[in-house]
Image: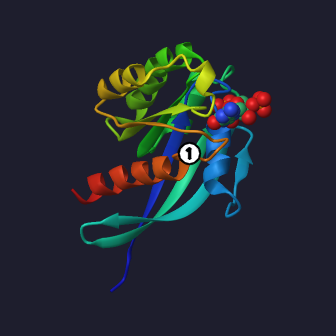
Amino acid sequence: MDRQKMKVKVCLVGEGAVGKTCLIRRFIQDQFDDRYISTLGAKVSKKEIKVDGPSGGMDVDMTIWDIMGEKGFRELLKEAYFHGAQGVLAVCDVTRKETLDDLEDWVAAVVKVTGNVPIEFLANKADLKGQMTVTKADIQSAAEAHDAPFLFTSAKTGENVEIAFAKLAQMITQRAVA
Ligand code: G3D
Ligand code: MG
């Protein structure tokens, strides 16, 4: 039987230095093929993963979009960056509570372009245990407001990184067959 194949576009959003680029790099490791779209200020990476489903496995070709200069990320570019995204990773830094609060605006900006797509909240830098200012209750309530799951991740140790991307891919494919 032929395995089902699906191409998906996902975006990472969040303030500068929360770890978006590092999460992607950690996930992609060495099987990557990426290019920098200078006019968009975005970097696109690809990875194919296998997702289990009720009707057997599915190969998911993930195209992962990373924002380069968050500060100068202009309204106009948002449209192109978010256009066609089927899933979103909303990333904050556990050592900076304000980066969680800022996710509200990022998520609102994405949803405005994409409509209602699966979102997963990531509380990154979970390895910095002594410096955590984002609690489980904080990230949980932010995620629940969007009916979204959440995970504590660390691009540094690799904790939950693979799982985070796989979970988002699964949410996207489940929605596609539903
Ligand atoms: P961004 O793409 O969201 O802007 P980056 O963030 O991926 O560029 O990461 C910003 C900084 O945070 C980097 O530090 C990076 O090493 C660090 N970082 C990213 N993820 C983690 C993590 O999980 N744990 C820890 N401890 N640090 C992390 P520098 O110093 O290179 O700017
Ligand atoms: Mg970056």
- Looking at the image, is 115 positioned above or below residue 7? above
Spot occupied by residue 105 in the image (x, y as percentages of width and height):
46, 18
Image position of 120 (left or right of 156): left
In the rendered image, residue 146, in percent from the top left (x then y), is placed at 31, 28
Q: Position of residue 99 (x, y in %)?
A: 55, 18
| Quadrant of the drawing holding the C terminus | bottom left
Residue reaching furthest to the left: 178
Which image quadrant for residue 69? top right
How many neighbours does mark 1 have within 10 angstroms: few (below 14), some (14-19), or many (20 or more)?
some
Residue drawn at (30%, 27%), measured in percent from left and top? 144
Lateral position of residue 63 relative to residue 119, left or right? right
Q: Nearer the viewer, residue 29 or 11?
A: 29
Depth check: give the residue in front, 112 or 16: 16
On screen, residue 167 above or below 127: below
Secondary structure, mark 1, is loop
In the picture, residue 145 is in which quadrant?
top left
- Check disc 1 and report the residue beneath it: 159
- Mark 1 lies within 8 Å of ligand 1 (Cβ measured): yes
What's the coloring here? rainbow
* Residue in view at x 59 percent, y 27 percent: 129
Furthest-front residue in this view: 130
**Closer-to-camera residue (40/91):** 91
**Residue at x 49%, y 50% (from the top left corner):** 165
Residue located farthest toward the bottom when viewing the structure as drawn: 1
